[in-house]
Amino acid sequence: MMRVAVTGGSGKLGRAVVDELVSHGHQVTNLDIVAPREQRCPYTRIDLTDFGQVVEALTAIDARHDGLDALVHLAAIPGPGAAANAATFHNNVTSSYNVFSAARLAGIKNVVWASSETLLGLPLEIPPVAIPIDEEQDARPETAYSLAKLVDETMAAQFCRWDPALKMVGLRFSNVMEPHDYAQFPGFDADPSVRKWNLWGYIDARDGAQAVRKALDYQATGLEVFIIANADTVMSRPSAELAAEVFPGVPISREITGTQTLLSIDKARRLLGYEPQHSWRGHA
């Protein structure tokens, strides 16, 4: 059992993460500026852009906790266009710095946070250098939102350099979906260009939560970054066929079978033991 704080625990992915950690016996505190729809664990309202509040939230909060073993940082303006570019960048980078720095002051050595698939060059107006995309390809932020995510990863590398005992895991989540979202998926087949912006990827929130739990359990130090997507795409057509049609001339770096994801999850499978359990095909 770990004492874990989850920032953004009221959000779409956050709700699934809270459920996953609570169901596995962890003592969870939700730190968010928005109250949860259903309270599965203690909740405290925190403005993550206020460093003093974040330090207090991670060191001790009366009637909540008197110390933490681990931190999951999910809170952010959730994507490009959700706010003005400068507002998104300043909010997200400031919040992440405050959380990472406060965790260091609190002596927390186990940090998992939400990076983003947008670092992979999304919306892929410039084709990828190879398909599937994996963590070996250089980050290519194309928006203020994804640039902020790259700053987060850069900061995390330096925090780990400062403290060799620290573990920080960045999870580059694909487009987060819940079961009620799957009703729209069959319609994507009519026009592959609608979802080409992320190579037709997605992540079921419950599998995203599984990845968070396994990242917390991962025994290592230093920085690691993983792409987290479902094992399949949002499409019914074969993935290799889609890649050849929509991205002609882009090298295919390995065999692609069926509707296999084009956002490689091989590293997460190998190091975290991550294996998606949910697919839209069982819900459509």
Image: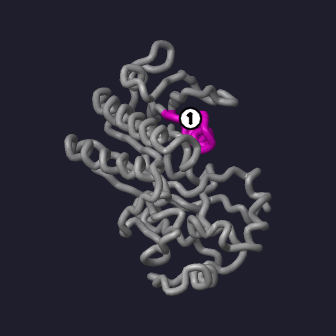
**Magenta span:** 6-26
* Corner quadrant of residue 50: top left
The answer to whether one can see residue 2 in this image is yes
Q: How many numbered marks appear?
A: 1
Work out whether 161 lies above or below 97: below
Specify the quadrant that holds the C terminus. Answer: bottom right
Depth check, front residue: 263 or 258: 263
Relative image position of residue 217 (x, y in whole percent): 42, 47
Identified at 38% across, 69% down, the residue is 137
* Corner quadrant of residue 129: bottom left
* Corner quadrant of residue 113: top left
Work out whether 99 lies above or below 190: above
Identified at 49% across, 77% down, the residue is 131
Name the residue furthest top. 62
Identified at 35% across, 48% down, the residue is 151
As helix, strand or loop, the secondary structure at mark 1 comes to: loop
**In this rendering, would 191 be left or right of 134?**
right
The answer to whether one can see residue 257 in this image is no
**In this rendering, would 176 be left or right of 225?**
right
Q: Residues within 10 Å of mark 1 (few under 14, many from 20)?
A: many
Q: Is residue 173 magenta?
A: no
Residue identifier under label 1: 9
Depth check, front residue: 75 or 217: 75
Residue type, label 1: Gly
Work out whether 199 lies above or below 253: above
**In this rendering, would 159 be left or right of 40?**
left
Relative image position of residue 5 (x, y in whole percent): 47, 31
Relative image position of residue 218 (x, y in whole percent): 39, 51
